[in-house]
Amino acid sequence: MEKEKQKKIVSRVIVFAIALTMLIPVSAVLASAPGMNSTVVYVEYKDSATLQTMMNNGAELLVDYNNGFALMKMPAAMGNTLRSAGMYVDNMPERTVVKLDSGVSFDTSSGAPNVPAAFSKTYSSDEVGTYIVKCVGPMKGEWTQELKDMGVSVEHNIAKFAYVVRMDGALKDRVSQLPFVSWVGVYQPYYKVPTKAFDMDMPYLSATLYNGANLDAVVNSIINAGGTVLQVEDNANTPDIVTFTAPQSALSAIAGIDDIYMLYLESPAKPMDLVADDIHGAKNLWYPS
């Protein structure tokens, strides 16, 4: 009885507040809400009745996470009204943004950013390439599994709500049509390079490889590009890592190595001074008591 009463109150509040805010008839609100100054929000609902009430009053259900949260498209006024009524409504201003460890960030609603030609790559339709797959909102485990079942190699999850994947052109076209996918674009070599590295003559970097990468081939490619390899980590259960230095002229070729996921700035090792020696007791390693 109490739930039914709450349902009726929520319904009346939504309809009345939207009509009052927009100064138009309630019937017009219900008829035009989905396309009128609408926004995508992540909203908490207490029960299915509350969810249905929102849908009855102009909200469009995009994703039900089946945990009391949903991704919905609704008039901005409705979101404000629900928020004022104490409901959790997140406008997710960065929902369409991609953020990478390199410091590169862009809004997919405006398409891919322009990158320097030397750090750009394209793939033919029958070539396996590396792509960013942007989801409409917080990812569900079922989405990851669906991609894998299609033959997509899911490599990494990245902010916000996106994957770095490997697939050919035919798969890319199919993935682009999935209802939970909002954007697909090439994972450009430029995205891998720390933005601060472009200001350094000889950056000190580590390359994190994809699982299953050909470590020896990557090392040789870095050397052939003009880099100096300092350390190689052949890891059993985590991605392999190659630490190196390279001049600016070599960065585009190194970033273009397909088996490299991301480059990270490192701090060169420095010899200890006498103070550090005293703090760490390094002399005892040579002159045990």
Image (tube, helix red, strand yellow):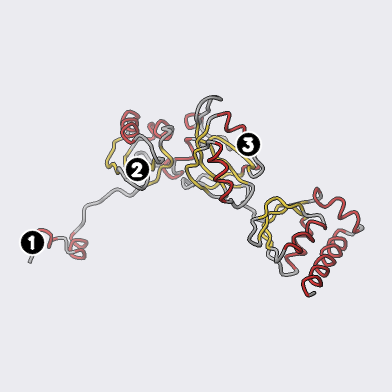
Residue 198 x, y percent position in the rendering: 43, 40
Question: In this view of the protein, which residue sits in the foreground, 31 or 154?
Answer: 154
Q: Is residue 253 above or below residue 54?
A: above
> What's the distance in space between the residues labelled 2 and 1, CA to CA?
36 Å
> What's the distance in space between the residues labelled 2 and 3, CA to CA?
30 Å
Q: Quadrant of the N terminus?
A: bottom right
State the residue position of label 3.
Answer: 176
Q: Residue at x 80, y 48 (%)?
A: 35
State the residue position of label 1.
Answer: 287
Q: Is residue 248 above or below residue 89?
A: above
Q: Quadrant of the C terminus?
A: bottom left
**Badge 3: residue crowd in 10 Å (few <14, some 14–19, many ≥20):** some
Residue 30 x, y percent position in the rendering: 86, 55
State the residue position of label 2.
Answer: 240
For residue 200, which quarter of the picture? top left
Asked if the residue at tag 3 contacts the one at tag 1, i.e. Cβ–Cβ closer than 8 Å, the answer is no
Q: Residue at x 70, y 52 (%)?
A: 40
Which comes before the other along the chain, label 2 or label 3? Answer: 3
Three-letter code, disc 1: Tyr
Three-letter code, disc 3: Ser
Q: Which mark is residue 73?
A: none
- Say which element carries label 2: loop
